[in-house]
Image (tube, helix red, strand yellow):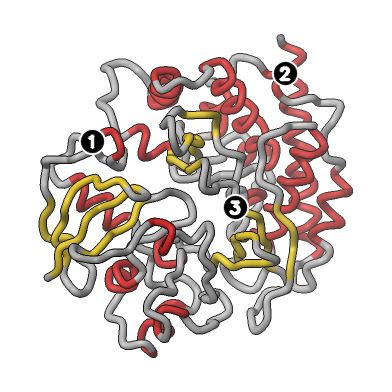
Amino acid sequence: MMEYYLMRKDETVTICSLTDDGQMISWSDNFKNPELAPLEHRGHRAYLRRWWQNRQIPVGQGHLENMLLEKGVADSGEYLIRNLGLSLTDYYWMKPVGSVLKWKDVNLFQNDFRENILQAIDAGWSKEPRSFTPNSSLRGELEKSWIIRKGKRYLVKGNHGELSSESINEVLATDFHKAQGYDNYTAYSLLQIKDRPYDFGCCAQAFTDEHKELISAHAILTSERRPQGMSAYEHLIKLGGAHGMDEEQLRADLEYQILSDYLLTNTDRHMENIGVLRDADSLKWIRMAPIFDTGKAFAAGSVVPYTEEEIDSVEVNSFEPTEQKLLGLVRDKSRIDMFKLLPPDAIRQKYEKDSKMHPSRIEHIVRLYEKKIEKIEKKYEKK
């Protein structure tokens, strides 16, 4: 067991005890800078342990399990602590007690790293003690990896199975937001990844940096008790306002996201796929994070809804259990410009790039998109 300081950049938050395989045993409740502590699960008696466990990458992601075995690393907890818990979305890290390391020595916004777990490229820390990776804190089951291209940080993502659906969906969402003239989305592009069963993966440049970090909606919603009778959706907006955000701008961004997700049939807008950006110095919350993770659009990995009943009862993982109930949260349907929609044929052309996708599935997806447009237009007519 070793002792570490939980740090946010060069500010000490508290002291923790961790085992060699990265399990948090104890920590001091006497926080030196409580305002800098992680938000996630505040109020829970084991909140810091929960936060640390949730920071670990799922061991089944990509080539990770085989890489860890080759390096003699027990699991993702040990992988995380070997890399000091570093991330490319925030500024938290674990500093061994007695160490002279500073944020400038370890932060991965400025210090290079070589590892690419999606393509099984060797982990730099195995040979260079001060070469760390942000991949040990990547959440989610989809195979992915942080990489550096021309000095910039990019997230490369793959797919589940042999179809390129999830990567193509990220690019279609990019094209949709661009056509709308919306100014707050993550731009993805297709790329080929060697030795994978699918034709294309995708990549996007990091929207966090040394000056702004990401706080997930999950972290926000678990940071303070929700008032009785208030929905999680309204609670998120109120907490945003309490931390300096423009509530109307936040509501507008959320409504746009709900409407665009509906048209793209994105069913996985859970609370880790929504977030806000926070200023590194003032701690002021700036704006909702650029829309990201739309890979589960158009029924990726499942049967495409076809009948009217199926289309009207799509279930989602979000603020509400169904698309129809999510639409009920939207006060202003004009957040989407119906004259600037992505043409159906643009969707067909993107999917036709995938050599393994059956033409009939493509036509079902295009039909689904056209039916969604019809249904939104009818809602406009009623208004």
At label 2, counting other C-alpha atoms closer than 10 Å, the crowd grade (few under 14, some 14-19, many 20 or more) is: few
Mark 1 vs 3, N-terminal side: 1
Q: Which residue position holds label 2? A: 334
Residue 89 x %, y %: 47, 50
Using the numbered discs, state the Cα–Cα distance from disc 2 to disc 3 in whole angstroms.
Answer: 30 Å
Look at the numbered discs 1 and 2 and tell me whether their residues touch, using CB distance below 8 Å. Answer: no
The part of the image, by quadrant, that contains residue 331 is: top right
**Residue type pointed to by label 1:** Pro
Is residue 189 something that shows in the picture? yes
Using the numbered discs, state the Cα–Cα distance from disc 1 to disc 3 in whole angstroms.
Answer: 27 Å
Using the numbered discs, state the Cα–Cα distance from disc 1 to disc 2 in whole angstroms.
Answer: 41 Å
**Residue type pointed to by label 3:** Ala
Left or right of residue 8, residue 381 in this image: right
User: Under tag 3, what secondary structure?
Assistant: loop
At label 1, counting other C-alpha atoms closer than 10 Å, the crowd grade (few under 14, some 14-19, many 20 or more) is: few
Mark 1 vs 2, N-terminal side: 1
Left or right of residue 60, residue 211 in this image: right
User: Under tag 2, what secondary structure?
Assistant: helix
Taking depth in this image into account, of 101 and 163 the one nearest to the observer is: 101
x 61%, y 64%: residue: 156
Residue 240 x %, y %: 44, 23
| Label number found at residue 34 | 1
